[in-house]
Image (cartoon, rainbow, N blue to C red):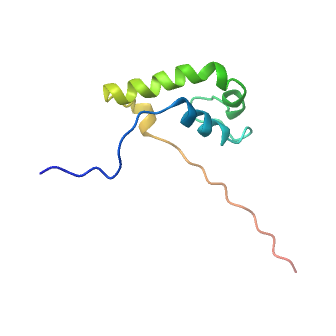
Amino acid sequence: MSTIPKFEFALVTNVQICCAISWLGPYKAPGAESISNAMLIHCADLLLPHIVLIYLATFMLGAYPEQWQNSVTIVPRKLYVLEP
């Protein structure tokens, strides 16, 4: 029994990664790897060739690092002040 793909797979492109970086908020809290969005934004031209190779290798080898499989999302609660 074969499954029909829901979409056609295409490898990641430089343009897609540039677009993803451009959507980052520069002052958001860094992730577990402590890389700030501001650093990614300001150094995108230097990092882009390396980031693309990492993603291409991941897809071509079928290897997905275990550290990438987990994420921690912290949702801070907003304090509401009731008006008298």
Residue farthest along the right direction in this orientation = 84
Q: Position of residue 27 (x, y in %)?
A: 74, 39
Q: Image quadrant of residue 24?
A: top right
- Decide if residue 51 is on the left or right side of residue 30: left
Q: Image quadrant of residue 66?
A: top left
Residue at 20 percent of width and 51 percent of height: 3
Look at the image and tell me in which quarter the C terminus lies.
bottom right
Q: Nearer the viewer, residue 13 or 20?
A: 13
Residue at 72 percent of width and 61 percent of height: 78
Q: Position of residue 54 (x, y in %)?
A: 46, 24
Residue at 53 percent of width and 20 percent of height: 50
- Decide if residue 37 is on the left or right side of residue 31: right
Compared to residue 41, the image places residue 9 above or below, namely below
Q: Position of residue 40 (x, y in %)?
A: 66, 29
- Decide if residue 23 is on the left or right side of residue 79: left
Q: Nearer the viewer, residue 6 or 39?
A: 6
Residue at 67 percent of width and 31 percent of height: 36
Compared to residue 84, the image places residue 16 above or below, namely above
